[in-house]
């Protein structure tokens, strides 16, 4: 008996008949090994052997050989495939050979850098001076690192603000820099990735100043375009290594559909309840299981419900299930980790945003509470089970989102579909200009710097000169601003300034929860908003527009969420492309989106019932960005059977369906994009649906929507046509971020409109 057998028993239970709507077997994979073209130092081989590693897998050999030849690479292989050895071994080999080389390792979070530091130090190699260099590093430790470290582990923000502006202090390290490691490549997308692309260009520019030419090693989960994304980040060709040579046990994967409770509204049973049922049943069979949830509150609810179910059958098993999330006291987390390690804890419910920091290699099963947004994330989470050699199981509980329900209707696509592409847009002038300023502060700008920053450099320099931030002298451009520019540039946002979110913990201590760029703060951090950060829920008590601060209080127990009501106007500033689209047209270009938040409503999370509507008095905000938009003439609408009074509901509902399914074609979520629909747009003179990038200047999402418009529209049309609800639900044409609270939606008219845009016969 194993976890796959347990899943079979669960599916055959008469109480759960029909819920397992899809099941597939992922075959076992034998290890494939190879020999390095240039052998490692004998001391490194001895240390590998002591760890039980006598042969390297094929992708590890390909990566190490390529790095030895000075080729930029990206290793995009599965969970637990030993990607870290691809760069650890070259680093350790160089240290053992007493080479003067240095290495810079960049991770998106401090926690990942700390984990990797522990891993590097575990090799116990004399002369390996590896340190983390981030905002938590003490002043004396920073000084030591600059003078003595040969391996520095950091994050993008620290490289941007704490290393590059002070590169002269790092001169020796940088002139010896041979390897730059960029981990979690798949997280460097959108506006964050576009900013990091310029940080890496600035790093290479400074390295060239000191005479070094380092090689890049990117590491990524499986995505649709690893080489393309990596090349866009480092402005150089990158070789992709995607053929995973690591072994894998057989796994079974199931898709779980919650029972339909109301055919009219499309309401289904609770996803938390279904997840806890599956967790309890795997635990009851003695299968170590991890259930991923979307929030801290969800983790607690799933764990509590699973314990109650187990209590009825076997009270001794109920104590073997727990929630594991950020926010616990250190001693509480250590105790949970100890119990998971010794087997006394069998079931864990955890937030999918949480970096576990624990050994989960003994898992037999994984339950995903809702599609995590991308195929890359889903496959990575599902891959956490099955590292023991036993057959393992993974079950995805489909949520309410359009994306979840599209995959519920097309389950084979979960493993047959190419993973989504991740995009960046370094040429975005709103991103380029501040990094040109940072580069000028680091070293005077020269015409040859166009090699790093592209043809937009001249325009950026011109605007900075007009702002009196740059001054020409002897053919170069020198920084003339009053203060260093790096601290004013937030990497994870697209705005020139950010709002800091200050939270008061349960013990009364204030701390920085996060930041929100100015273009999004009124949507997610207005007074009264419920804000979710790393699985924890906060309520915004006050928003200070002058000092750019928002004050938050914990609200983990609040059974509610908030939605803003807004008035949106969109103006087309430039149309770049236009192509026929069924009975209409698709367009790509630049737009200005002016948004005014009018009010917000508090809604009960468990029932969707409205608690109250609260007016807001906030100034309008204008976002210059990129958009893909669709137009249909009145004649085409009439031919599709859409009456004039149905047009507003049709365009609005179709807009929601299109936004909900856009992540099928690019690694983004619905919060990265916006939409506007009008029965008659003043510029087009026709019913128009806009889908736009949610960041100033755009992050490349609109371009991907335009490139994949046929598949995108067809998928949206199928989703709406096949949804069993009558008038529209969260699985087809409703949106959790709708600025009009999902009013004026016409599901049937939207189906006809999408069919017309897809060029299909009206269903």
Image (cartoon, rainbow, N blue to C red):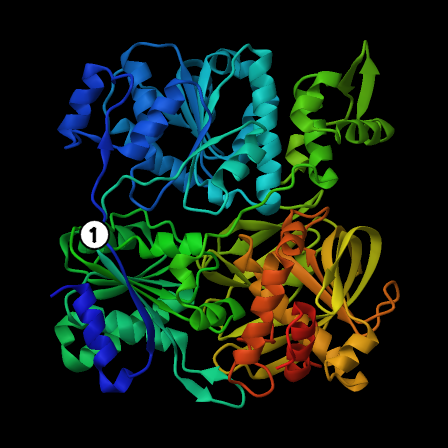
Give the SS element for disc 1: loop
Q: Position of residue 71 (x, y in %)?
A: 45, 23
**Which image quarter is the C terminus in?**
bottom right
Residue 244 drawn above or below residue 307: above
Side (left or right) of 328 relative to 342: right
User: Taking 284 as reference, is 668 left or right?
Assistant: right
Residue 263: horizontal and vertical position, in percent?
A: 49, 89
Observer-nearest residue: 298 or 741?
Answer: 741
* In the rendered image, the vertical position of residue 50 relative to residue 98, given as above or below: below
Residue visible at 67% across and 22% down? 451
Position of 502 compared to 269: left or right?
A: right
Residue at mark 1: 249
Which quadrant is home to the N terminus? bottom left
- Foreground: 507 or 491? 491
Image quadrant assignment for residue 438: top right
Image: 384 above or below 268: above
Location of residue 154 in the rendering, given as x and y in whole percent from the top left corner: 46, 31
Q: Nearer the viewer, residue 284 or 603?
A: 284
Quarter-of-image position of residue 271:
bottom left
What residue is at 52 percent from the left and 80 percent from the top? 723
The spot of residue 16 in percent (x, y) is: 28, 82
Q: Residue at x 52, y 49 (%)?
A: 511
Badge 1: how crowded within 10 Å, few (<14), some, or many (20+)? some
Q: Residue at x 13, y 77 (%)?
A: 314
Q: Relative to 566, is 380 on the left or the right?
A: left
Q: How many marks?
A: 1
Residue 9 appearing in the image: yes
Q: Is residue 525 visible?
A: no
């Amino acid at each position: 008996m194993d976890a796959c057998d347990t899943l079979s028993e669960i599916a055959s239970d008469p109480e759960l008949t029909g819920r397992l709507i899809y099941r597939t077997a992922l075959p076992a994979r034998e290890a494939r090994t190879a020999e390095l073209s240039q052998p490692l130092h004998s001391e490194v081989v001895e240390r590998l052997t002591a760890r039980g590693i006598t042969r390297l897998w094929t992708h590890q050999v390909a990566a190490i050989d390529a790095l030895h030849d000075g080729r930029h690479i990206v290793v995009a292989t599965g969970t637990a495939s030993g990607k870290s050895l691809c760069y650890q071994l070259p680093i350790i080999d160089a240290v053992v050979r007493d080479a003067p080389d240095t290495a810079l390792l960049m991770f998106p979070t401090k926690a990942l850098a700390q984990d990797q530091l522990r891993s590097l130090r575990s090799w116990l190699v004399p002369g390996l001076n590896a340190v983390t260099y981030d905002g938590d590093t003490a002043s004396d430790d920073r000084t030591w690192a600059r003078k003595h470290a040969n391996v520095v582990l950091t994050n993008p923000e620290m490289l941007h603000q704490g290393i590059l502006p002070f590169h002269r202090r790092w001169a020796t390290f940088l002139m010896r820099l041979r390897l730059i490691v960029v981990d979690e490549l798949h997280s460097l997308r959108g506006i964050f990735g576009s900013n990091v692309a310029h940080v890496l260009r600035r790093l290479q520019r400074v390295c060239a100043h000191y005479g070094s030419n380092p090689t890049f090693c990117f590491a990524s989960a499986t995505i649709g375009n690893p080489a393309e994304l990596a090349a866009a980040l480092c402005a150089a060709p990158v070789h992709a290594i995607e053929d995973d040579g690591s072994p894998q046990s057989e796994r079974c994967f199931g898709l779980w559909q919650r029972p339909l409770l109301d055919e009219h509204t499309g309401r289904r049973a609770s996803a938390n309840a279904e997840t806890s049922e599956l967790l309890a049943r795997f635990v009851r069979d003695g299968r170590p299981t991890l259930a991923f949830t979307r929030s801290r509150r969800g983790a607690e609810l799933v764990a509590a419900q699973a314990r109650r179910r187990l209590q009825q059958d076997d009270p001794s098993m109920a104590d073997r299930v727990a929630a594991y999330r950020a926010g616990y006291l250190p001693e509480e987390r250590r105790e949970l980790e100890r119990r998971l390690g010794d087997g006394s804890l069998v079931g864990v419910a955890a937030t999918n945003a949480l970096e576990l920091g624990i050994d989960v290699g003994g898992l037999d099963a994984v339950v995903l509470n809702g599609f995590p947004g991308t195929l890359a994330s889903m496959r990575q989470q599902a891959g956490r089970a099955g590292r023991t050699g036993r057959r393992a199981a993974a079950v995805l509980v489909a949520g309410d989102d359009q994306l979840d329900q599209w995959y519920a209707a097309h389950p084979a696509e979960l493993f047959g579909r190419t993973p989504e592409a991740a995009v960046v847009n370094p040429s975005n002038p709103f991103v380029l200009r501040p990094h040109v300023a940072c580069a000028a502060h680091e070293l005077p700008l020269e015409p040859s710097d166009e090699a790093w920053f592209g043809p937009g450099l001249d325009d950026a320099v011109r605007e900075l000169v007009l702002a009196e931030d740059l001054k020409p002298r002897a053919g170069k451009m020198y920084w003339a601003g009053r203060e260093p520019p790096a601290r004013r540039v937030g990497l994870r946002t697209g705005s020139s300034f950010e709002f800091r979110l200050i939270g008061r913990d349960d013990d009364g201590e204030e701390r920085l929860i996060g930041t929100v760029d100015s273009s999004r703060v009124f949507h997610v951090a207005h007074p009264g908003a419920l804000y979710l950060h790393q699985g924890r829920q906060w309520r915004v008590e006050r928003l200070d527009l002058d000092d750019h601060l928002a004050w938050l209080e914990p609200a983990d127990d609040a059974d509610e969420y908030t939605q803003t009501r807004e008035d949106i106007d969109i103006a087309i500033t430039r149309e770049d492309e236009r192509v026929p689209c069924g009975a209409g047209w698709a367009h790509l270009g630049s737009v200005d989106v002016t948004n005014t938040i009018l009010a917000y409503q508090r809604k009960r999370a468990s029932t969707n019932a409205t608690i109250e509507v609260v007016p807001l008095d906030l100034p309008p905000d204008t976002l210059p960005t990129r958009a893909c938009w669709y137009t249909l003439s009145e004649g085409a609408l009439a031919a599709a059977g859409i009456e004039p009074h149905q047009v507003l509901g049709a365009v609005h509902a179709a807009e929601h369906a299109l936004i909900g399914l856009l992540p099928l074609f690019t690694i983004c979520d619905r919060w990265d994009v916006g939409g506007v629909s009008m029965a008659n747009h003043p510029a087009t003179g026709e019913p128009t649906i806009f889908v736009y990038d949610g960041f100033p200047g755009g992050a490349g999402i609109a371009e991907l929507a335009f490139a994949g418009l046929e598949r995108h529209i067809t998928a949206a049309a199928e989703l709406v046509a096949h949804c069993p609800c009558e008038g529209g639900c969260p699985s087809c044409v409703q949106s959790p971020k709708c600025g009009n609270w999902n009013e004026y939606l016409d599901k049937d008219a939207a189906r006809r409109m999408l069919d017309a845009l897809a060029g299909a016969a009206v269903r």
